[in-house]
Image (cartoon, grey):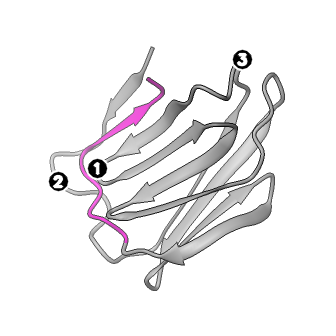
Amino acid sequence: EAIVYALSDKAIVDAGNQLTASVWVKLDEVQGGGKLLQWGGLSLEVKGGKAVLRADKAELSGGDIVATRWTQIALRLGSGKATLFVNGAQVAQGDAATPALGNSLRLGE
């Protein structure tokens, strides 16, 4: 079940700003997919055993997410780039603008 945090009545992060976020997950199943985080135009999920980052119109995926094992998934946005990390190792990078991030943060599905 998802948890939704109401953060503010205005955007928390303006479009184009820098952002770093990290989550720790221990999933029972990783092949079918599942959304970990949704924040405006930014989402982080696991699909097909890989971490997937969507920021604005860009999509990055990589890393191996193993069922029943604690895994750190992190993202960095800024300077026109998005970078995805799994357990501290960079697994993907691409061009992406930081989207304006709204007033609610959703964790889980």
* The quadrant where residue 100 appears: bottom left
> What residue is shown with label 3?
28
What is the crowding at mark 1: few (fewer than 14 residues within 10 Å), some, or many (at least 20)?
some
CA–CA distance in space, label 2 to label 1: 12 Å
**Badge nearest the viewer, 2 or 1:** 1
According to the image, label 1 marks what residue? 40
Residue type beneath disc 3 = Asp
Q: Please identify the quadrant where the N terminus is shown.
A: top left
- Label 2, label 3: how far apart the Cα atoms are: 36 Å
Q: Residue 24, position in %: x, y? A: 69, 38
Comparing 32 with 106, the one in front is 32
Residue 79: x %, y % from top left: 46, 85
Overall secondary structure of the magenta section? loop
| Mark before the other along the chain sequence, 1 or 3 | 3
Residue at image coords 81%, 22%: 68
Mark toward the start of the polypeptide (2 vs 3): 2
What is the total number of numbered labels drawn onto the structure image? Answer: 3
- Between disc 1 and disc 3, the foreground one is 3
Q: Name the residue rendered at 80%, 59% in the picture.
A: 88
Task: Give the residue furthest to the bottom.
Answer: 79
Q: Type of residue at label 2?
A: Lys
Secondary structure beneath label 3: loop
From this view, report whether residue 34 is shown above or below residue 43.
above
Q: Nearer the viewer, residue 109 or 12?
A: 109
- Find the magenta span and give its range: 98-109
Please state which of the two labelled residues, at mark 2 or mark 3, is closer to the viewer.
Answer: 3
Q: Which mark is on residue 10?
A: 2
Q: Which amino acid does label 1 sit on?
A: Gly
